[in-house]
Image: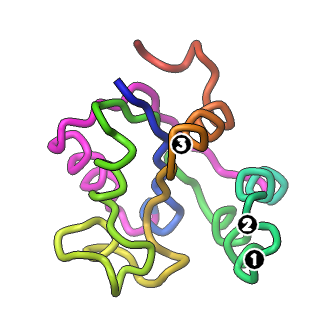
């Protein structure tokens, strides 16, 4: 079984679509083995998104990610990284396929409802950022 990190971003929480997002994951055969709601500090958001620190959107992204609570989850399934990214849809909701989370709920490239790890190494790092081994159900 593979694991990945998924985040319902502040816009997903404030729009009240967290339940629908989680439901879509579960209906796709993805198991949630850890979940918590947190509000990131600016320092935490900058650390989490440090890979993007040289990108022009870094400051607005980190400001957005601290604008309200997020829901962080550890997801588990066979090929869960690809499965979750397919459910999310393209980063730009205008380019996302119909029926994907971003196409159905996102307003723009930055406020795009969800985050998902892009590979196994990233997933391992991102999971450790939010969860200890004791918090993850096996």
**Precedes in sequence: disc 1 or disc 3:** 3
The segment highlighted magenta reads 14-41
Tell me whether the residue at label 1 lies in contact with that at label 3, contact meaning CB atoms closer than 8 angstroms: no
Q: Dot 3: what SS?
A: strand
| C-alpha separation, residue under disc 1 versus residue under disc 3 | 27 Å
* Above or below, 69 relative to 14: above
Q: Is residue 25 magenta?
A: yes
Q: Residue at x 29, y 46 (%)?
A: 22
Left or right: 6 with respect to 38? left
The residue where tag 2 is placed is 52
Q: Residue at x 18, y 76 (%)?
A: 98
The residue where tag 1 is placed is 55
Q: Nearer the viewer, residue 73 or 66?
A: 73
* Quadrant in the picture for the N terminus: top left
Tell me whether the residue at label 2 lies in contact with that at label 1, contact meaning CB atoms closer than 8 angstroms: yes
Q: Is residue 103 magenta?
A: no
Q: Dot 1: what SS?
A: loop
- The local crowd at label 2, few if under 14, some if 14 to 19, many if 20 or more residues have their Cα within 10 Å, is some
Q: Nearer the viewer, mark 1 or mark 3?
A: 1
Q: Nearer the viewer, mark 2 or mark 3?
A: 2
* Quadrant in the picture for the C terminus: top left
- The local crowd at label 1, few if under 14, some if 14 to 19, many if 20 or more residues have their Cα within 10 Å, is few
Q: Estimate the x, y position of residue 59 in percent, counting from the top left.
A: 78, 75
């Amino acid at each position: 079984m593979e694991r990945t990190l998924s985040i319902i971003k502040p816009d997903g929480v404030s729009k009240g679509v967290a339940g629908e997002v989680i439901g879509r994951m579960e209906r796709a055969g993805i198991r949630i083995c850890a979940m918590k709601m947190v509000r990131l500090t600016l320092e935490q958001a900058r650390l989490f998104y440090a890979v993007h620190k040289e990108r022009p959107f870094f400051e607005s992204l980190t400001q957005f990610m601290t604008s309200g609570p997020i829901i962080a989850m550890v997801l588990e399934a066979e090929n869960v990284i690809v499965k979750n990214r397919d459910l999310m849809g393209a980063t730009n909701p205008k380019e996302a396929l119909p029926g994907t989370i971003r196409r159905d709920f996102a307003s723009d490239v930055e406020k795009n409802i969800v985050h998902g790890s892009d590979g196994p190494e990233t997933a391992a790092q991102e999971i450790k950022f939010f969860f200890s081994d004791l918090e993850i159900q096996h």
